[in-house]
Amino acid sequence: MDRRENIKVLLTGTVATGFLLSSGCKPDADTTTTDIELKGYGRVPQEILHDKKISNETFFSDKEKKMVTILVDIIIPKDEKSGSATEAGVPDFIEFMMKDYPKFQTPMRGGLMWLENFSLASYDKSFVDITHEQRIALIDQIAYPDTASVEMKNGVKFFNLIRNLTCTGFFTSEMGINDLGYVGNRPNQWNGVPDDVLKKFGLEYDQRTLETCLKIEDQHKIAKWDAEGNLIG
Amino acid sequence: MSFHIKEQDKKYDVCIVGSGAGGGMAAKILSEAGLSVAVLEAGGDFDPAKEEYRTQLRWPYESPRRGANTQRAFGDFDAAWGGWEIDGEPYTRAEGTQFDWFRSRMLGGRTNHWGRISLRFGPLDFKRKDVDGLGENWPISYDDVKPYYDKVDQLIGIFGTKEGIYNEPDGFFLPPPKPRLHELFVKKGAAQAKVPVIPSRLSILTRKINTERGVCFFCAQCNRACQVYADFSSSTCLVKPAMQKGKVELYTHAMVREVITNDQGLATGVVYIDKKDLNEYRIGAKVVVLAASACETARIMLNSKSKQHPDGLSNSSGVVGRYLHDSTGTDRMGILPELIDRPRYNEDGVGGLHVYSPWWLDNKKLDFPRGYHLEYWGGMGMPSYGFGFGMDTMRKYITDELGKPTANGGYGAGLKNDVRRIYGSTVGMSGRGESIPQYDNYCAIDPDTVDKYGIPVLKFHYKWTDHEVKQSKHMHDTFEEILTGMGAIILGTKPGPETQYGLAAPGRIIHEVGTTRMGDDPKTSVLNKYAQAHECKNVFVVDGGSFVSQADKNPTWTILALSWRTSEYIINQLKSQNI
C-alpha cells in the first residue's frame, strides 16, 4: 500500500486528518539552521525569541570554524553509504549548540586552542595549515581514551566532546537518519516483530500473546465490553 | 479580599482551578450535570491538533538543537510547556533538603506529555498501614473507587490484559500491542530473575472507543501529544469536549492566588492574576474545586488566609502541605551484543513500553517496606540529540569479524560504521516505587520570596528516609539480575550509598502527592473521604493532594477516578442543598 493511502486508511474518520493528509509524513525541511525563523516546530513565543536571538550571534571565529570543519570530517568522513559531517550540516549544528548550551563554550574553545598549541609545538604551524597526515598524527594521540598518555588528557577530553557532537549531529540529520536506516516517524501498523527477525533471534510470540494482543484489522471497530470488562466487540 | 480587585462580571456554580487530570474530569462531570463551570488555567491554550503547537511527527533536524533538552526538560519535541524551573515562578528549598517541582503551564497540564502508564491502585494500596504499620490508611477502600476506575477505563481508553493479580486489579482493557524485540529479550532475562513481565497498561487507543478520537498510528511519540487524540490528555479528552457540550468557560493565563471566603468561612470564589495584563480579577462561585496540582493547591490554600482561616484555608490542623511524597526512581542500562548489527524495520510502536513488571515480592522477606514496578526501554527509536554520544566508552563492546573488540573512541569510516552497528542495541529499565509519606516532608510558604505575580512561593523540605534508599538499592540488584539474564553487558557502575543508590531526588519522578490528604480525623487530615475540605465545605481538592499514600503505581488514573467520585458528590450535595 502506498504511504499516502496508508495514512488515509489509518486516519479515516478521525478528528484531525487535515495536517497528515496534506503534508504527508516526511517534512521537506532542510538540515541547516540558518533559516529557522521561517520554520515552526511547535514553539511558544519565548522559545522563538531565544532561537532567533542566538541564531543571530556568532560563536566560532573564522579560524575556529575552519578547525571544526576539518575535525568533523575526520570524525565522520564520506563513505560508500553517505556523505561527510560537513555535508550533513554538522558545523552549523555545533555552532548553534555552543550558544544554546553555554557550558560547552569553554571546553570547546579551550580544546581548539589546546589543539592549535599542540600543532604549533609539533610542527611550528597552525592546525589549519598542516597536512592531513600531520593532523592524523596529532589526532591519533588524543582519539583513544583508554591508551592515550596522561599528558594528552586535555586533548582526549576535547576530542570526546567534538566526537560526541559530530556523531549526534550527523546521525540526527536527514542524511544520517537515512544512513542509519531508521524507518519510523510516520503512521504505521505495528503488528509485532517481523517473522524473519524473530526467527533470526530464535524467538517467537507465545500463544497467549498472540491471542490477547491487538489484531490490526480490528483497530477501527469501536470497542465494547461486558459488565466484567471482557472485550466483546 | 480588598478593594482594588476588579470584579469579574461572571459568577459560576463551580470554579475549577487547574485543567489537568483532576480539573478536566471535574469540568466534564460537573458541566454534564448542567452546572456552569469556570476552568482557570495558569498557562496557555493548547490543542495538539493545531499545526502551530504540533511537535508530533517532526524530525530531529527540524530543531536547530536536534531535540536537545536545553530549552524543554524532556527535549524540544516534548509537549510540556514548563519544567522543573520556570522563569518568574521560583520556589525554594530548606537547607540540606531536596525537591524539584515540575509544572506544565498549559491547558491539560502535565497530562500532555506523561507516559500514559495508567495503573489502578489495588486493595492493599489503600490500606498500607494495615500491612506494614507505616504511614496511614486511606479512609476509603478499593471497593469505593473501583466503579470509577471502571468508568474511567471506558471513557478514556486503556490497553492491557486481564491477569488476575490481586493488587493489580484488571479493568476494561483494549488489546495491547505485541512486544518489541528488546522486550522479548527482557521477558527472557526477567524470567531468569523470577520477575513477572506482563503487557503494559497505557491510556492509548489501540482501538477506537468512540467517533471523536482517532486510533493509535504507532509513532511512539505520546509525550509530544497526539494530533488525532489517540492518547489521553485532559485537554483533548475532557476539557475541550466539556466546553463543546456544556456551560464551561476557560480562562487561560489565570494564575490563582487565593480562595476568598465570607464571614462564615465559606468560599465565595477565587482571586487570580491575569498573566497577560498583570491585573487581579475575581471569579465568584458557589463551589471551588482545587485541581492545581498537589503543591500548587497547597500553596493556594496556605496563601488563602482570613479571619476564619488564619493559618490558611481549612488548615487549623497544620496539615496543608505536609506528607508531600513522590515516587522513588532509579535506572540502569546495558547493551545487548546480540542486537548489534540488527536488521532494520519500523519498531516505533506505541509511546512507551509495551511490557512492564508489577511488584512481585513480599516485603516481609525484605529490608524495606512497599514495592516498585519496572519499566523497560530500548529499541530502534528515532535518533535524537544524544544518539551517537559515548563512543569513547561503548565502542569496545563492538567486535570485528574476528571477534576482536574495537578500541574505545577513534574517528573515521570505522567509527561511522560502528555507530550504525550499535544503533538499537541498548536496553534499559527504570524502577518506580512507593515511598512512605512523612509529616516532616512538606512544602510551606516561604515568607521571603514572591513570584513575578507577587504571590508568595513554596519552600520545600524533603529528605528521603532509609526505606526509600534501601528500596533503590534493591532495584539496582534487580536491574543487574535481569540485564545479566537477558545477555546484556551492563553499562556504567552500580551506584552505592554515596548517591543513595542512584535514588532520584524527590520531585524528579513527577508523581508528587499527599499535601492535602484525606482522612476521617480533621486533626490529621485536610479533606474528608470525598475530598471536601474539613473546615470549608464548599471547597474540594481533586488533584493528587488528597492522596494518603502513592502506591507503586502512577497517580493519574486514581486522580481521574477520585475526581469523578468527588464531582458526583458535589452534584448530590448541591441538589440536597448541603453546600
Image: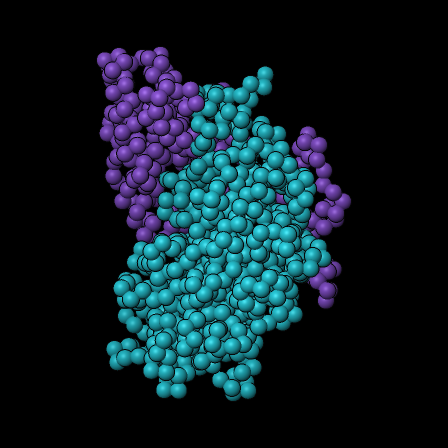
Q: Residue at x 72, y 41 (%)?
A: A205
Residue B248 in sight in this render: no
Along the horizontal axis of the image, is B537 left or right of B213? left
Query: Residue B555: where, in percent of width, then height?
Result: 53, 60
Q: Relative to A222, is B546 above or below? A: below
Q: In which quarter of the image is the N terminus of chain B?
A: bottom left
| Residue toward you, B254 or B214 | B254
| Closest to the observer, B39 or A139 | A139
Residue B47 in the image: above or below residue B258: above
Q: Which of B157 and B546 is in front in this view?
A: B546
Relative height, residue A215 to residue B382 (above, below): below
Residue A162, located in which quarter of the rendered image?
Answer: top left
Percent coordinates x, y for residue B489 in the rendering:
57, 32
Q: Is residue B490 left or right of residue B257?
A: right
Q: Where is residue B239 in the image (x, y as percent from the top left)?
A: 49, 66
| Label tally | 0
Q: Which residue, as the protein is rendered here, is positioned at the far right?
A: A207
Task: Please say whether residue B369 is visible from this viewpoint.
Answer: yes
Foreground of the two, B539 or B96: B96
Colour that chain A carries in the picture = purple
Please give the name of the residue rendered at 36% of the width and 87% of the height, measured from the top-left corner: B263
Q: Chain B is drawn in which colour?
A: cyan
- In the image, residue A24 lies at what x, y percent? 51, 43
At 35% from the left edge and 12% from the top edge, which residue is drawn? A133
Q: Which colour scheme is used?
A: by chain
Q: In the figure, is residue B178 to the left or right of A111?
A: right
Say which quarter of the image contains residue A77: top left
Q: Which residue is drawn at 29% across and 77% down?
A: B6
